[in-house]
Amino acid sequence: MNNQLLLSLVEKYGSPLYVYDSEIISNQYKRLTKAFKKVKKVKINYAVKALSNVNILKLFKTYGAGLDTVSKQEVLLGLHAGFKPKDIVYTPNGVSLKEIEDVAQMGVQINIDNLSILEQFGHHYPKIPVCIRINPHILAGGNHKISVGHIDSKFGISIHQVPHILRIVENTKMKINGIHMHTGSDILDIDVFVSAADILFDVAKQFDNLEFIDFGSGFKVPYKLGDISTDIEELGEKLTARFNEFSKEYGRELTLMFEPGKFLVSEAGYFLASVNVIKQTTSTVFAGVDSGFNHLIRPMFYDSYHEIINLSNPDGKNRYYTVVGYICETDTFASNRPIHEIHEGDILCFKNAGAYCFSMASNYNSRFKPAEVLIHNGNDYLIRNRETIEDILRNQTEIEL
Ligand SMILES: *Cc1c(COP(=O)(O)O)cnc(C)c1O
């Protein structure tokens, strides 16, 4: 990404600002589909929660992608963006039977991840096909908060409970059309992924009416120089061979599904903030920016590393800074980080700001959420207005006191 272009966007749209580059999103999508080109039927469902601006969803629609959703509201967004219900998979956790019924009525593919709801749903709607989320108990998360495959995880139905699933299917006569897993973000090891897939095949062959197997996501992308990232091409080779072999054994051409979020959008996003103040203490130089965990919470919530560059002084000498926000709580983006010399008023760029950044933003401290800009085919488009005080007050009802 061109630094001058990013700086000009801050001048045009103000700070702080989220900027997304559609070319990077499109390249990641192409990379993934290319890696699995030897599987006859492949469907990529973009995980909406990573970045849910409706224009981003429309972008994925132009690629022929589907959507992976985790709430009724994400389903409504997807339908608003023009997706057909059959191109949306709904994979909730801990939601009510009522919400699952509502989404099923819309014609969206339901994915159920607990025995209680499975039994109730099957009892009431034996004709609506459902997918089952299996927990293969593979520990693959990069951070304990986003690792969802272990034995005591709240996600998925344990592989040890497959006999129970089969009994529910037999009793209710419901139809299972898909088997799913999602073992958590940040999978480092392809062999871990492939062993989880093998476990899933073992489950899949016990169901007669499958149309697809959904391998979830968890692909890792580099956040800093030298980071390991998922070798999608190698995964493609290894999993394609196994999948095609399984399809043959199963006796029907199954669809291979994935539902990546981070892999598709993380590297396409840039978060731009300006430096309000440089403050020197006895041991530390703080750079305080016009943002905080209200706009980008990953460093504080997950200890995530986001590379930070000083767009305003690209040739400056490296100095060590602790980059903090303006929230009245400790909100440290980076500690003791070498960054080109920072002056007040400089614009800092936080990289990998496409996934789980804007979508996790809040109004804490009654701050406005930033504007979002999409760079597409050489043009820049404002895809979300910066908030105003009206947005903060919108749903507050004022009583006489
Ligand atoms: C969040 C989520 C994803 C996307 O995970 P990434 O690590 O962003 O690729 C996929 N599937 C389900 C069910 C999810 O909850």
Image (cartoon, rainbow, N blue to C red):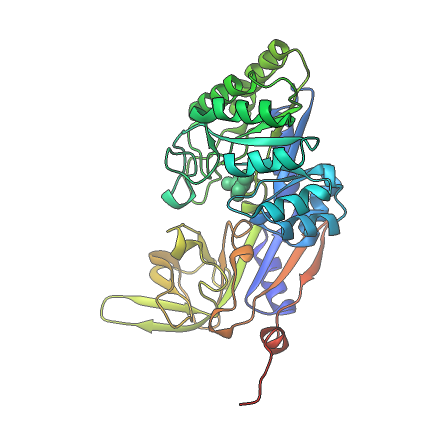
Residue 76 shows in the view: yes
Give the residue drawn at x 54%, y 66%.
Answer: 16
Q: Residue furthest bottom?
A: 401
* Looking at the image, residue 94 lies above or below residue 31: below
Q: Position of residue 158 (x, y in %)?
A: 44, 29
Residue 262 shows in the view: no
Give the residue drawn at x 38%, y 32%.
Answer: 139
Q: Position of residue 247 (x, y in %)?
A: 62, 14
**In terms of depth relative to the viewer, which is nearer, 399 or 271?**
399
Q: Position of residue 74 (x, y in %)?
A: 64, 50
Q: Could you tell whether 357 is left or right of 131 in the image?
A: left
Q: Residue furthest left?
A: 282
* Looking at the image, residue 17 lies above or below residue 30: below
Give the residue drawn at x 72%, y 43%.
Answer: 105
Q: Which quadrant of the figure has residue 104? A: top right
Q: Could you tell whether 308 is left or right of 383 in the image?
A: left
Give the residue drawn at x 61%, y 31%.
Answer: 131
Q: Position of residue 310 (x, y in %)?
A: 46, 60
